[in-house]
Structures are given as C-alpha cells and as structure tokens.
Image (cartoon, helix red, strand yellow):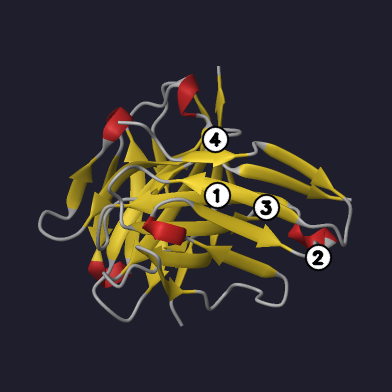
Amino acid sequence: EAGVAQSPRYKIIEKRQSVAFWCNPISGHATLYWYQQILGQGPKLLIQFQNNGVVDDSQLPKDRFSAERLKGVDSTLKIQPAKLEDSAVYLCASSHGESEKLFFGSGTQLSVL
Amino acid sequence: AQSVTQPDIHITVSEGASLELRCNYSYGATPYLFWYVQSPGQGLQLLLKYFSGDTLVQGIKGFEAEFKRSQSSFNLRKPSVHWSDAAEYFCAVTSGTYKYIFGTGTRLKVLA
C-alpha cells in the first residue's frame, strides 16, 4: 500500500513569513495526526483529526498555527507568522482506528531564519 | 501526569553485542505500548506493540520487548545488534483514546 505522503520535503523561510505543509494519509485511514519534532526531542502532537473533525488540538499554538482536513482525506498545516522556535520537522501520521499503529510520512523539515 | 521516560539519550554498542533500551511510563489507564524506530531523514516506523496478553512481544528486525507492569517499564531488546540498527528509537504509550505520548528518544550508535 502507498505510504503517507508529505510535501514539501524541506522549507526555509524567514521569521514572520507564512508556510504551509500538505499531507495525504494512507487510503482508508480515518485518523490523521500532525506532530512537531524539535531536534533532539520526541514527536509532540499538534493536532489529531478523526475524519474531518478535530479530536485533540490542545497543544496547537492557535495564535499562529492552523490545520484543516477537508473531506476527511488530505490535510494542510499552516504557520502564520513563523517564529524562530518553529524550526522543526513536521510529521504527518495516519492510523486506521483506535490505538492502531501509526504510519508516518517522511516529514517536512522547516528552518526559520 | 502522563509521561514516557527514556533515560538513555545515547547508547553505543559494538556490532554483534546485545542491546537493551529502557522505557518507563506513567499512565493512569491501562497502557498500550509501542516502540518506533527513526532512521535519519525518515519518519518513524513501528517495531512492535503491546496491547495485552503475553508480556514478551516480538517485533520486526529481531527486536523484542517485555512489559513489566510492576516496574512500569517496556524495555526493548535485541540479542545481536547489526550496523543497520543505528537509528533513534522512541517508546510511546496510548490508552485507547487515540492520544499518543512519545518519549524523548534514544540514539543508538553501532561500532564496527
């Protein structure tokens, strides 16, 4: 089966600019996650969707981060405006159901200068 | 508070030697436990998982892990490490309500 697709692979922007990441989960996976992984740390959940509804966005900095999952398939994560501390790898993952294993994309490495 | 602790940030072993990576969790509900591996520039890949039943679980690439409820631990082991095992390893826990918590990871270096 095709894996989780993410783009772009790398992004370099200046602080205060905007950036968007795209994720296409594995076909049929109802649950989609966005994680932020700062260098040297484990992945931190930003937002979790079940179909096109938000299950958990308690750790999403809503003043600058937004995410949507229209039609319950693809998802986009946006940062506006970006800060230096947003430099990280942004991982998208999907799963079929409750407590199932996560399938991860390769991530988008963001550098904010 | 719910948490996952991986006390070893870096571990170095010689090729062919045995390996044990430690994971301790603090979780109010019955935990579902996972080990993931991340190679450089890649996403995370599941090695193994424990939901219930036999406390010794087998995973891919020759890895195994043992769930010890009394010690709140889920340590990962491999009897003989290969150079290709060099990567970062993450322990994770969830309770069936979808929210995963990941540890900070252990970076494994393998000496030839």
B26 sits to left or right of A8? left
At 64% across and 36% down in the image, what residue appears? A9
Q: Secondary structure at mark 1?
A: strand
Which x, y percent locates residue B49? 26, 50
Which residue lies under the disc numbered 4?
A: B42
Q: Earlier in the sequence, mark 1 or mark 3?
A: 3
Nearer to me, A67 or B77: A67
Which residue lies under the disc numbered 1?
A: A91
- In 3D space, how far apart are the residues under numbered discs 4 and 1 (Cα atoms)? 10 Å
Q: Nearer the viewer, mark 4 or mark 1?
A: 1
Query: Do dots 4 and 3 share one subunit?
Result: no
Q: Earlier in the sequence, mark 2 or mark 3?
A: 3
Q: Is residue A39 visible?
A: no
Nearer to me, B74 or A76: A76
Q: Nearer the viewer, mark 2 or mark 4?
A: 2
Q: Secondary structure at mark 4?
A: loop
At 50% across and 54% down in the image, what residue appears? A75
Nearer to me, A33 or B50: A33
Which x, y percent locates residue B90? 47, 50
Q: Earlier in the sequence, mark 2 or mark 1?
A: 2
- In 3D space, how far apart are the residues under numbered discs 2 and 1 (Cα atoms)? 19 Å
Which residue lies under the disc numbered 3?
A: A20
At 66% across and 74% down in the image, what residue appears? A61
- Identify the subunit bearing mark 2: A
Amino acid type of the residue tagged 3 in the rendering:
Ala
Which residue lies under the disc numbered 2?
A: A81
| Image quadrant in which you'd find residue A11 | top right
A82 sits to left or right of B95? right
User: Local crowd at mark 2 within 10 Å, few (<14), some, or many (≥20)?
Assistant: some
Nearer to me, A86 or B86: A86
